[in-house]
Image (cartoon, rainbow, N blue to C red):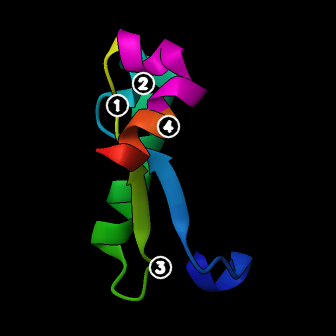
Amino acid sequence: MWCCCGCKQVVTFDAGGVSGHGNHVAVYRGAVGLVVKQAAAPPVWVLETTGLLRKYLGAWDAAWSLLW
């Protein structure tokens, strides 16, 4: 599959799926399943689920994360 679409990397949600959203969890499971089955799969980057406070702080959280 990877050779057909020409993708170099995959970015997906983590197993928590951002607040447990069913579609997000399914995307993660699908990406992991393909990587496990194919030896020549591209690297998979996973977005980490954060708590609700960090989720809604936006730019403030980004600045805080850079400093600490």
How far apart, in angstroms, are the residues tagged by discs 1 and 2?
Answer: 5 Å
For disc 1, the neighbor class at 10 Å (few under 14, some 14 to 19, many from 20) is some
On residue 49, the disc is 1
Q: Could you tell which of marks 4 and 2 lies nearer the N-terminus? A: 2
62 or 24, which lies in front? 62
On residue 62, the disc is 4
How far apart, in angstroms, are the residues tagged by discs 4 and 3?
Answer: 28 Å
Residue labelled with disc 3: 42
Q: Could you tell which of marks 3 and 1 lies nearer the N-terminus? A: 3
- Name the secondary structure under disc 2: helix
Image quarter hosting the C terminus: top left
How far apart, in angstroms, are the residues tagged by discs 3 and 1?
Answer: 22 Å
* Residue at far right of view: 5
On residue 18, the disc is 2
Residue at horizontal 33 percent and vertical 26 percent from the top? 50
Q: Quadrant of residue 59?
A: top right
> Which residues are the magenta region?
53-61
- Name the secondary structure under disc 1: loop
